[in-house]
Every structure is written in structure tokens, then in C-alpha cells.
């Protein structure tokens, strides 16, 4: 296996610039996690007081659910807190993700980005697709089909293919063990809201965003980051895409500077809150002109869905 080409930070930043960009913080990551939960809590409160606002709050909360994943992603790189122990515990307890399996998987993605050994290559390889195919994917996301397939599809397939007389309970217990963190946290959340007489708020403004808007914005993120990026490319400045995000796009699609994915792949030691500064420095030095940069998510979707594609895709 041949690892993807890497950039040398000293070719783009002075030692002082690099030290500032990569400095670990004992409070910034925690502040972002707190901000994420405060936005979710505020959006839920708005939905409880003004139920007509629930559809909008579903989008806000679903985007912040992606935000929790983005912050966990920073934790996978050891960037969320200066202490590795605190970093990993925050990812587990406050971002709802176990790093044990995700960290080696994700680091393999970085090592072999856009190479045959990249475990995420399957997400970007099918593009471009037709507009009809893209609309089908979006429909599946917004109707919960994608969520069900990702979360319970393996179990459904296993049950459908079980042999006559094969016990169902062991299958269910095995699946529950695999998803113990998901079930534990969501069960606890539902119970707390039910005690307060607001079980419906948990269903409509936590589970519903998770099952609909979160799959959609996760798909848009995956498309923007690596779709139509050259496979087996040798230019490390073009292994991923940076997408400029407006305030509206940041609110509903791209939280916590996830849109600066080109910079993240070039310099994995930079925490998410410093990626905009890295982008500005690179722009001043003329480096961004050599990178894959798009003006917004609409522009990316136009690239990823073309009417002239022969196959409609799945």
C-alpha cells in the first residue's frame, strides 16, 4: 500500500504561524461542545414554546447533531483538549461517540485519502450522478430511509436471512450490545423528557432531526469533501475540497468550520477553530489558487449532479 502524498507545514507557514495554528487549548474545544448543546437546547425550547417553529428547529438541531460528530472528529485527532484523557472522555460523554473504533478507521482514511485503501472512498467514488439520482438520495434521507438502513439495516438483513428455528433474541441482544451507547443515551434522554411531560419534544426535536436532517447534511458534507476529487492523485493540495460557507449554510449545513476540509487534510494538527485562519494565511500566500475550492454548497452539488450522466445511479 502506498500512502497519499503529504505536505510539509514549513513550506507554507513560519514557525510562529505554525505554533499558533496548532496550539492545543484546554477551553476552546470544551466551549464549542457547550455551544453545540446550548444551541440544541435553545432550539428545543423554541419548538416547545412555538410548535410552528419545529420544522425549522429540526434543521437547526440536525445540523448541531452533525456538529457533535465534527467535534468528536477533532477529538479523534487529539485536538479537542490539551489532555488526551479529557479529549477522549469529552468525545464519549458529551459528543456521544466511542473513539476506539472510529480513530483507527479515520486515520486510515487520512493516510490513504483517495487511494484504493481509503475506507471512505466508497462515499465519493459514485460521483458525478444525475440530478434524478441525487433527488432520490435526498428523498431517502429526509424520509428516514437512510437512517434506518445505516442504523438497523444490518439487523433487518440478519433477521430476514435467519434459518428456520434460529432464535431471534440472541440477534437482538448482540445488536443492542453493538449499539449500547446509542441506546443508552437516547433512552436516558427520552426518559428525562418523559418525566417532564415533554416526551414528544424528544421525539420531534431529537430523534426526528437525527433520522432526517442529519443524514442529509452528512451526505452533503461527504459530497463537498471528496466527490469528484481525483483518485490516486499525487498533489496533496487537492486530496480534499474546501467549500466556502455562508452564514445560512453554516447554520443549517456546515457547523464548526467543517467546510475547510482541504486545509484539514493538508494539516491534520490544526484544530477546527483555527482552520479559517489557516485558509486566510494560505490565501494571502497564493496557495488556495492551487487547491480545490468551491464558492458554496450549491456549486458543489451542480458539479456532483450532471444531466449528461448516462447512469441514474442508486
Image: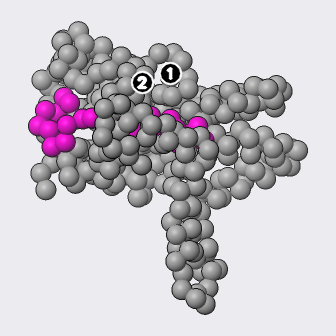
Q: State which quadrant residue 306 falls in.
A: top left
Q: Main secondary structure of the magenta part?
A: helix
Question: Please, what secondary structure does the residue beneath circle 1 have?
Answer: helix
Badge 1: few (under 14), some or many (20 or more) residues near its Cα, within 10 Å? Answer: some
Residue 226 position, x and y percent, is 31, 37
Numbered tag placed on residue 196 in the rendering: none
- Residue depicted at x 30% and y 53%: 119
- Residue depicted at x 57% and y 50%: 145
**In the rendered view, does 9 fall on the left or right side of 159?**
left
Q: Which residues are magenta?
A: 212-238
Real-space CA distance between mark 2 and mark 1, rounded to the nearest whole angstrom: 8 Å
In magenta stretch: residue 33: no
Residue 91 position, x and y percent, is 50, 46
- Residue depicted at x 20% and y 16%: 289
- Residue depicted at x 72% and y 54%: 188
**In the rendered view, does 289 fall on the left or right side of 185?**
left
Compared with 158, 237 (above or below) is above
Q: Report the residue marked by disc 1.
A: 249
Depth check: give the residue in front, 184 or 63: 63
Q: Residue furthest top?
A: 284
Q: State which quadrant residue 300 falls in.
A: top left
Q: Is residue 129 visible?
A: yes
Compared with 105, 35 (above or below) is above
Numbered tag placed on residue 297 in the rendering: 2
> Does the CB distance between marks 2 and 1 fall below 8 Å?
yes
Q: Is residue 259 visible?
A: no
Amino acid at each position: 500500500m502506498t500512502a497519499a502524498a503529504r505536505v510539509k507545514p514549513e513550506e507554507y507557514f513560519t514557525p510562529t504561524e505554525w505554533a499558533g495554528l496548532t496550539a492545543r487549548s484546554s477551553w476552546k474545544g470544551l466551549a464549542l461542545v457547550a455551544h453545540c448543546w446550548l444551541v440544541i437546547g435553545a432550539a428545543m425550547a423554541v419548538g416547545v414554546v412555538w410548535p410552528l417553529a419545529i420544522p425549522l428547529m429540526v434543521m437547526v438541531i440536525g445540523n448541531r447533531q452533525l456538529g457533535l460528530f465534527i467535534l468528536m472528529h477533532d477529538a479523534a485527532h487529539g485536538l479537542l483538549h490539551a489532555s488526551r484523557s479529557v479529549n477522549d472522555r469529552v468525545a464519549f460523554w458529551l459528543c456521544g461517540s466511542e473513539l476506539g473504533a472510529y480513530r483507527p478507521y479515520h486515520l486510515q482514511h487520512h493516510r490513504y485519502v483517495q487511494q484504493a485503501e481509503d475506507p471512505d472512498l466508497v462515499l465519493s467514488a459514485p460521483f458525478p450522478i444525475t440530478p434524478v439520482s441525487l433527488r432520490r438520495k435526498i428523498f431517502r434521507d429526509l424520509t428516514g430511509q437512510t437512517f434506518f438502513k445505516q442504523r438497523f439495516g444490518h439487523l433487518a438483513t440478519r433477521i430476514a436471512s435467519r434459518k428456520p428455528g434460529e432464535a431471534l433474541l440472541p440477534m437482538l441482544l448482540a445488536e443492542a450490545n453493538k449499539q449500547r451507547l446509542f441506546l443508552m443515551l437516547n433512552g436516558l434522554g427520552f426518559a428525562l423528557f418523559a418525566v417532564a411531560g415533554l416526551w414528544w419534544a424528544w421525539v420531534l426535536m431529537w430523534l426526528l432531526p437525527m433520522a432526517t436532517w442529519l443524514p442529509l447534511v452528512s451526505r452533503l458534507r461527504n459530497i463537498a469533501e471528496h466527490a469528484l476529487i481525483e483518485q490516486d492523485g499525487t498533489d496533496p493540495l487537492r486530496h480534499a475540497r474546501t467549500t466556502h460557507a455562508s452564514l445560512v449554510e453554516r447554520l443549517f449545513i456546515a457547523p464548526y468550520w467543517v467546510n475547510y476540509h482541504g486545509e484539514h487534510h493538508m494539516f491534520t494538527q490544526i484544530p477546527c477553530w483555527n482552520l479559517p485562519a489557516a485558509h486566510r494565511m494560505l490565501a494571502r500566500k497564493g496557495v488556495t489558487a492551487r487547491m480545490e475550492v468551491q464558492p458554496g454548497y450549491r456549486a458543489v452539488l451542480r458539479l456532483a449532479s450532471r444531466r449528461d450522466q448516462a447512469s441514474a445511479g442508486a
